[in-house]
Amino acid sequence: MDFKKIGEYNILSLAYLGDAVWDLAVRDYFFSLNLKVDDYNNKVRSLVNAKAQSSIYKEIFNNLEEEYKNISKRGRNANIKSFSKNCSITEYREATAFEVLIATYHLLNENDKIQDLLNLIIKGE
């Protein structure tokens, strides 16, 4: 798949896919640490929510290649009809942009970039 093909998909469907991919990647990462269930759940929830995703997106946006910036901006500017009560509208839009970015990495088989993000966020690498 290429950027042109990805650009043909409904942007909110990409975000929905990206949310699932991010959730699984985070769960896989913390699962490998063999944590107690409560600790495992708390760590996953700390990264799989709109506020955290918004924060990550803001941190990495300037370092993204132009094509990734463009597709994630489409997610940020999407016509979202309902917003979470746990964050601001801006945070929710940035989280949507992040999810579109994750879906794009996934569809382009660039899962190493997702892992790099996890390492950056969790280990500071």
Image (cartoon, rainbow, N blue to C red):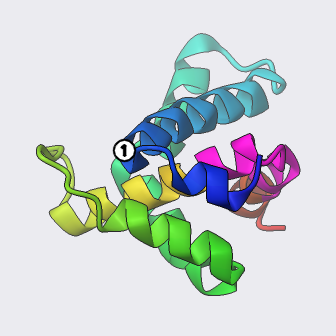
**78 to the left or right of 97:** left
**111 to the left or right of 67:** right
Percent x, y of residue 15: 45, 44
- Which residue is rendered at x = 66% and y = 82% of the image? 66
Q: Main secondary structure of the magenta part?
A: helix
Q: Which contiguous range is marked in magenta?
A: 103-116
Q: Amino acid at mark 1?
A: Leu
Mark 1 — residue? 12
Comparing 99 with 78, the one in front is: 78
Mark 1, residues whose alpha carbon is within 10 Å: few (<14), some, or many (≥20)? some
Question: Does the image show residue 49?
Answer: yes
Percent x, y of residue 79: 20, 56
Comparing 89 with 75, the one in front is: 75
Percent x, y of residue 57: 51, 68
- Which residue is rendered at x = 41% and y = 50% of the image? 11
Comparing 122 with 117, the one in front is: 117
Report which quarter residue 95 is drawn in: bottom left
- Which residue is rendered at x = 83% and y = 50% of the image? 110
